[in-house]
Amino acid sequence: MTTVKPNYVRPLDFKHGRVDMSHGSGGRAMAQLIRELFAAAFDNAYLAQGNDGAILPAANGRLVISTDAHVVSPLFFPGGDIGCLSVHGTINDVAVMGATPLYLSASFILEEGFPLADLKRIVESMARAAREAGVPIVTGDTKVVQQGKGDGVFISTTGVGVLPGGVELSGDRAQPGDCILLSGTIGDHGMAILSQREGLEFSAPIVSDTAALHGLIAAMLDSGAALRVLRDPTRGGLATTLNEIAKQSGVGMMLDEAAIKVNPPIEAACEFLGLDPLYVANEGKLVAICAPKDAERLLAVMRAHPLAHEAGVIGEVVADTHGFVQMTTKLGGRRVVDWLAGEQLPRIC
Amino acid sequence: MKYVDEFRDSGLARNIAANIAREANPRRTYRLMEFCGGHTHAISRYGIADLLPRNVQMIHGPGCPVCVLPIGRIDQAIRLAREVILCTYADTMRVPASDHLSLMRAKAGGADVRMVYSTQGALKLAREHPQREVVFLAIGFETTTPPTAVAVRQAANEGLQNFSILCNHVLTPAAMHAILLDDTGVNLDGFVGPAHVSTVIGSRPYEPFANDYAKPVVIAGFEPLDVMQAILMLVRQINEGRAEVENEFTRAVTLDGNLKAQKLVSEVFELRDSFEWRGLGSVPHSALKLREAYTAFDAERKFGIGYTAVPDNKACECAAILRGQKRPQECKIFGTVCTPENPVGSCMVSSEGACAAHYSYGRFREAAW
C-alpha cells in the first residue's frame, strides 16, 4: 500500500534546484514554476484569472504604455537586484509621462541551470517592489534558453498607466528661460553596478538609487507648477538625457556644475576610474523642466519628498540653434556637455 | 573630495588667471604645447581656455597613447584577435584600422577581444584559460610600461606559457625631440611637461629641451590649477628670457623619478631601433621591445606577425594635429564625417585626443563666431 496521497506533487526545490528546459516547455513543470513561484509571489486577482491575458477595467483617461528590457550584470548589486530594478524602471518610464502607473506585465528569459534559489530571490524582490509601489504584475511569460545562450535571467516589463486630463509632458516642450531641476545626486546606480564588477572593490559604501518615482511625480503634478518635461536620467546619465531634451525641443541649456550633486564616494570612484558622473546611470532620479516662476514652489514640493530631499535647480534652458548643452565649470570656465560617445559601461540596467 | 578639490578651486583659479593676464606681454603671443592628453583633457573639461588671455595659446601635443598608434598596429591586433584572446584597455577599442574595422567592430564580427582594466586582468584570463593563447595589447607612454613589465615578469615566474604581449610602449622625450626637429613644425615657446610620465622618468630627461633647444619646460599635474600655475610659470620664464626645466608637480615628481620602476622596465624592455608613430612617422629609439630573455612573451615573434605600415585616411588631419601644426577645427572632416561615434582619425577616439576633447567640450566656441 502506498502512503503517497494521490494528488501529491513534490514542491519545487528552491534550495538546491535549478532551472531546466522543462520549465519553459509549456507542460506541467512550467505550470508548477508559475504556480509555486510567480503566482504565489505576485499574487493578485488579475493574475489569478489564469488566462493568456489579464482583463482590466476601463481606465478613465488616455493610456500610457512603456516597455523596458533588463539585462543588468551582476543580477544582485548593493541597493537592489534585477527584480526590483525591472519594476522601478518601467514604473518610472510611465510616471515621467505624467501618468499614474496601474499595471505591469513581466516576461522572463531564464537560462538553463540558473539556481531556483536566485530566481526566487529575484521574483520576491519584484513582488515586493510592485506591492510597495501599488502597481500589480497582472500577466507574464516565462521562456528557458539553453545553457550558454542567456546570462542567468533577463526580464522585460511593460507598464500601463493612465494620464489625467490637463497633464501634457513631452521632451519637445522646453522653452528658453525654463528652469532645469534635478531630484538628487547622480551616478549612484551605475557605480554600484561597476563596483561589483571586475573585482573593483571600494571600501566606501556605494549603493544603487533604484526607486519608483511615481509618488514623487504625483506630488509634483499636484503642486500645480507649469511642468514641461519630466525624464529619468538612466543609461547615458544626466548628460545624455539633457541632450535628448535639448534636441527634441530645439533649445540649448546652460548648467552650473557646482549645483549638480555627486555623493563623495561616487565622485571618488569616478575620479579613480576616469569616468564622468554626468554620464553614469541613475535609476531613482528625475530631471524636471518647468516655467521659471514655478521653480521655487516645485523645488519645495520635491524637497519635502524622501526621494528628492536633495533636489536643486541645476541650470536653465537657453535659446541656441546648435542645441548645445553647456556648463559653467566649477573652475569658472565653460564646456560643452555632449552626448555620451560609445558605451561607458555596458549592461547597467 | 579630499586632496582633489583644492586643485579645482575657482577662487584660486581666478587669482592665477589674473596673474597670467597681468604678466603676459600683450605685444607677443605665447604658444605653449601641453604634451600630454591628460592636460588636453583637463584644459577642455574645465574650460581653462576661457580663463586665459587670447595671446596665450595652448597647442595640443601628441601625448595621447591611442592617438599615436598607427593603423598598422591596430591591424596587427585585429589579426591576432581572430586567433587568440586579445586583451586591451577600453580606449583602444574604437581606434580606426584598415577595412573600416576597429577592435570593437572586429569583436562584433566574432574576434575574441576582452576589455581589461589592468595587466593583472589579462594575466587572470591567461590563468583561467590555459588552453587559449592570451595576448595583451600593451600601449602607452612611460606610465603604463611598468605595469606591463610586472605582468611579463609574473608570467615568466609562473611559467605562464599562454600569455604574451603585443608591445607598443613608446617614449615621451623621443616624441618631443621629433616635434622640435620637424622643419615644417610649429613654433613653440615652451612645453607644459607630462604629469604621470614624469613621476616615472623624473624631470631630468627634459633638460635637453631647455639646454639644447632653448624651450622652457614646466612639469605640471593633471588638475586644472596645476595646469594654470604651469602656464603662469612658462609665461614668466619666457618674459625673463629663461629656458629651464621647472617642476610645478613637486608633490609627485622628483629629479630622478621612480628608480625602482625604471630598473624594472629596463630589465624587461630595451629600445627599438625605430618605431612608426601616427603623425610623427618613424622616430628612432622612440619605443620599447621585450629583451631577449623575455621573447617568449613577445606576441609579434610568437605568432610571426610582421608590421605593415598603412597610410592614414587622406582627408584626416590627425598627423598635422598631433604635430601641433593644425587645430582640430581646421580639419575638413572634423565634426562632420569624423565624430566620436564614427572616428576617422585616432585623435577623435580617446577623450584625451585633441579632436575628441574639442568636439566633446569646446565646439560651442566656433558656433559663437
Image (spheres, rainbow, N blue to C red):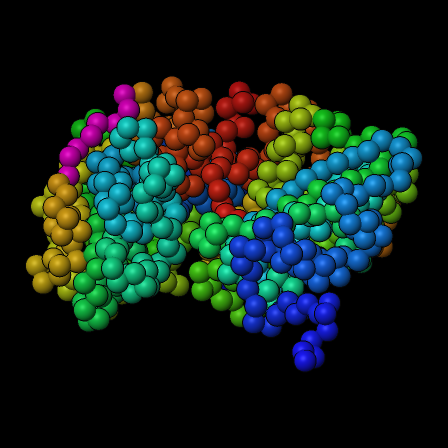
Magenta region includes residue B135:
no
Relative to A281, is B122 on the left or the right?
A: left
Q: Is residue A126 above or below residue B333?
A: below
Nearer-the-camera pick, A263 or B307: B307
Magenta-drawn stretch, dominant element (helix, strand or loop): loop
Q: Residue at x 89, y 32 (%)?
A: A61
Relative to A92, is B136 on the left or the right?
A: left
Nearer-the-camera pick, B167 or A80: A80
Magenta region includes residue B308:
yes
Estimate the x, y position of residue B116 in percent, counting from the top left: 37, 54
The quadrant holding residue B325 is top left
Estimate the x, y position of residue A264 in percent, counting from the top left: 60, 61
Estimate the x, y position of residue B47 in percent, counting from the top left: 52, 39
Q: Quadrant of the N terminus of chain B?
A: bottom right
| Total numbered badges shown on the rendered structure | 0
Estimate the x, y position of residue A231 in percent, counting from the top left: 71, 39
The quadrant holding residue B336 is top left
Q: Residue at x 55, y 51 (%)?
A: A144
Nearer-the-camera pick, B305 or A279: B305
Q: Residue at x 18, y 63 (%)?
A: B161
Q: Residue at x 44, y 33 (%)?
A: B340
Q: Is residue B367 visible?
A: yes
Q: Is residue A310 visible?
A: no
Q: Which residues are magenta?
A: B307-314
